[in-house]
Structures are given as C-alpha cells and as structure tokens.
Image (cartoon, rainbow, N blue to C red):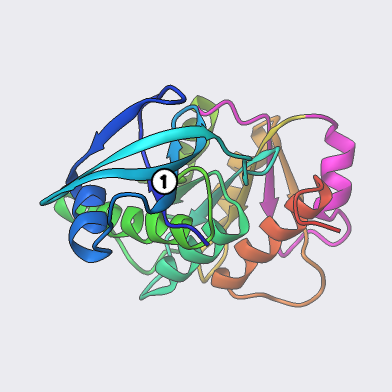
Amino acid sequence: MLPRLFLDAQVDEGSRVWVSGEDGHHFSRVLRARPGEDLVVCAANGPFWAEIAEVRSGEVCVHLRERAPSNEPRQRFVLVQGLAKGEKMDVILQKCTEIGAWGFVVFEAERSVVKLSGPKVDQKLARWRKVVREAAMQAQRDVVPFVVFAPNFSTSLAVIAEHEVQRVLVLDEEERERGIRSAMRAQGAGNRTAVVVGPEGGLASGERRLAKQDARCQTVTLGPRILRTETAGAVALAIALAESGDMGG
C-alpha cells in the first residue's frame, strides 16, 4: 500500500504542489520521505499517482503524475450517531470510515450518558477528526469523511438536509419487518443516504416522533438480535453498501 496524502484543493495533472502543516511534517519528519518515493495524493478533484519531488524540514513537494482509480463508494452514506460514552465513539468513527462512510453527524441524544458543551465540543471534534483521518489513510480512502456535532436529533436532521441527503434509515428496535435492503429498494434511486443509530439507550419517544414527521425517514431493523450502539452502525453501513454494490461480490 502506498502512503496517502490528502489535499483540500483541486490540483492539475503534472503539477507540483508544496505541502506543509500536519501532512508535511508527517511525510518529512515521521516517514522521512525521500525524492522519488511514490505516494497517492487525494485532492478535492480525485486521487493522483504522485512522487516526492523535494523535501524540506516540515514540508514536501509532490509531483502529480497522473490520475489514479478511485476507491470511493458510488453512493454516499452518512452515519448519524447518538453520542456514546467512553471510547466507543472512536471505535465507531474508525470502523465506519474503514467501511466507507462519507461523513458523520454525532448528535447528543436524549438518552446519551455523555453531555457536551462549550470547549468540550471543539476538543472532541478535533479528536474525532484525527481518528477519521488516520482511518481514511489506513483504509486507502480517497476522501476524509466529514465529522459534525449536533446538540440534538432535530439539528442532526437539519445538518443532513444541508448535505442533500435524500433518504434516512432509522434503526429502531420496535421495527420488526422492514430491513435496510427492502427500504432502499422501496425508496428507489438516491445517491445520498443517512443511517441513524441511537446511543446506548436507543432513541427516545420524542426523537422517534421527529423521524416519523420527516418524509425522508423510514424505520428499519437489523434483525431479532439487539446490537450494541458501537456495533449497529458498522453493520448497517456494511449492509447498505452491499445493497448498493460497493462491498464486492
């Protein structure tokens, strides 16, 4: 596997770009990159085969040789995750990034044990975004999934609307029949889907009512077994990606 470097800007094939900051430090000081070494540069307009052209203290210059094939799913899936306690959020974000999530909206649910406000929100977001970035590199992703915090479920629905999500699959232990595959087939085409997972205690009645009032939302089940919150999102995402043809086979 070639190392990956992520750029927010669009770039041109054949150009040379200097990279500083965290990635520049990582390649120059941690990986000790040398001119001529190969890598993949994942820019805003796609991945490129590239090589290290020059190295300075804390920065590298990369030569973008040609476009590389994309590793991204054809459909975009957002995990809307109820805030979980302890290190569970790190695990959820890491594993779902590896599987193929396009983005994450972490919301403080009514039954969330952990409560965030003020500086703690920024601290958590910084940590979560670092976890996601490292997982994207490891999984050979072409993009770093976005991570947004929402203070409640209502706000999380507004956030995914801003990201033009067309359908929302809400995991609900009270749902007995409709699974993810059947819900996706019934709703038809749509390349942006959100999957909602409650925290340890599940979604509260008020949050369920909000979902029922949103025309995009459908409740779905993962079967008769009760999965932990840190398991449910990864399973649901894998099923949805498999249904859309993005898990091989």
Instruction: Tell me where residue 95 sits by quadrant.
Output: bottom right
Left/right placement of residue 86 relative to residue 176 reads left
Residue 186 percent location from the top left of the image: 89, 37
Q: Is residue 220 visible?
A: no
Q: Is residue 170 visible?
A: yes
Residue drawn at (48%, 42%), measured in percent from left and top? 143
Q: Is residue 148 above or below residue 66?
A: below
Instruction: Tell me where residue 7 sits by quadrant.
Output: top left
How many residues crowd mark 1 within 10 Å: few (<14), some (14–19), many (20+)? some
Q: Is residue 30 above or below residue 194?
A: below
The residue under label 1 is 152
Q: Secondary structure at mark 1?
A: loop
Residue drawn at (62%, 59%), measured in percent from left and top? 99
Residue 84 percent location from the top left of the image: 43, 67
Left/right placement of residue 160 relative to residue 99 reads left
Left/right placement of residue 22 relative to residue 175 reads left
Looking at the rendering, in which quadrant would you find the C terminus? bottom right
Please report the bounds of the magenta region as a residue range.
163-189
Q: Is residue 90 above or below residue 132?
A: below
Which residue is the extreme one toward the front?
A: 36
Q: Which amino acid type is marked by label 1? A: Asn
Q: Is residue 184 magenta?
A: yes
Residue 202 percent location from the top left of the image: 57, 64
Task: Choose between 1 and 80: the one closer to the eye.
Answer: 1
Residue drawn at (52%, 29%), measured in percent from left and top? 163
Residue 54 percent location from the top left of the image: 23, 43
Residue drawn at (29%, 50%), measured in percent from left and top? 35
Q: Is residue 200 magenta?
A: no
Task: Choose between 145 and 225: the one closer to the eye.
Answer: 145
